[in-house]
Image (spheres, rainbow, N blue to C red):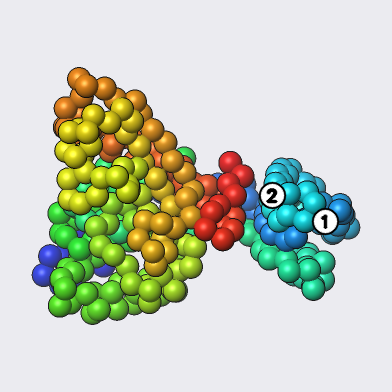
Amino acid sequence: MTEGATNADGGEAGARGGARRLVTPAAVAAHAERYRDVGRVLVTCPDRPGIVAAISGLLFRHGANITELQQYSTDPFGGTFFLRIEFHREDLAGELPAIEEGLARLAAGAATRWRVATPAVRQRVAIFVSKADHALQELLWRTHSGELEMDVRMVVSNHPDLGDAVAGWGIPYHHIPVTTETRDEAERRALALLAGQVDLVVLARYMQVLTPRFLAAFPDRIINIHHSFLPAFVGADPYSAAARRGVKLIGATAHYVTAELDAGPIIEQDIERVDHRHQVADLRRIGRHVERAVLARAVGWHTQDRVIVHSNTTIVFA
């Protein structure tokens, strides 16, 4: 395991030589330079005339050039309006406070939610896993290849099994066992690890239920992945149950985690067709394939500030 990681007994493990970097310093520097003067505005408000004109005019007055604009309304006559703008402005850091002040004035008294994101610094991510490694490996590989622009700070698991796989990337691996008797203490340890270090938590087949205390620390910032057999096939072996029923579709769902189990706002879903020739092992293999792709897309859209949560659904400007 890598430096700072915990071994199966909860002690500190030493550094392993030869671990390759998940993201090289050169890649971090190139990312920072590419997005140095880039900003993103996300807005949710009651639909009315002039919203786009007001915000684009504000950006124009502050010397910004809009490079991407996407919008959606639930109903142009009294519905809810959603907007994502990406813009470029030289020396953005110096002008950003004035832009945010202008947005605050536009939003005053209009039941408007807005935020400005600056992507020059990658979002910090913690990945939680149990024993299955397919979703974890996909996230790590896509980060290494540059497809996912994020800073993986740590991997946390209730089992020691994947420590060696993570060590090869030079990422801290924290083994925090969870039992019925130790659940509260395990969660306290996990939250202490994350405090001030992480912007997003990804559950890459983490087979534990998070408590409201944990969820409150990361509202709309915990993403989970699971098969899409719910609610028809539940329990420990849904693929066997699905095979007996003769399912013709295998799918996966990525969603934000809420207190209601597996019922949070959906970010992404996908399916693969199957037929009578596929055995249970085939269904599991296909399911893993879909889960990997769906989770990676959902995480990518979140880190690119393309997702707006509205009630128990999402607007995804992909």
Q: Give the amino acid type for the residue marked by disc 1 in the picture.
A: Arg
The residue wearing badge 2 is: 74
- Where, by quadrant of the figure, is residue 154 drawn? bottom left
Left or right of 193? Residue 55 is right
Q: How many marks?
A: 2
Locate residue 281, reporting x and y percent: 16, 32
Q: Give the amino acid type for the residue marked by disc 2 in the picture.
A: Thr
Locate residue 103, reporting x and y percent: 78, 66
- Vertical relation: 278 (above or below) 155: above
Alpha-carbon distance for marks 2 and 1?
12 Å
Q: Residue at x 34, y 77 (%)?
A: 192
- Where, by quadrant of the figure, is residue 151 drawn? bottom left
- Viewer-proximal residue among 274 and 133: 274
Q: Residue at x 55, y 52 (%)?
A: 314
Q: Residue at x 17, y 33 (%)?
A: 244
Q: Looking at the rendering, in which quadrant would you find the C terminus?
A: top right
The residue wearing badge 1 is: 48
Q: Looking at the rendering, in which quadrant would you find the N terminus?
A: bottom left
Left or right of 206? Residue 145 is right
Residue placed furthest toward the top: 277
> Is residue 176 something one can see in this rendering?
yes
- Viewer-proximal residue among 95 and 17: 95
* Among the two numbered marks 2 and 1 on one chain, the one whose residue lies closer to the N terminus: 1
Question: Neighbour class for label 2 at 10 Å: few (<14), some, many (≥20)?
Answer: few
Question: Neighbour class for label 1 at 10 Å: few (<14), some, many (≥20)?
Answer: some
SS label for mark 1: loop
Locate residue 243, reporting x and y percent: 20, 33
- Vertical relation: 82 (above or below) 246: below
Q: Residue at x 73, y 54 (%)?
A: 79
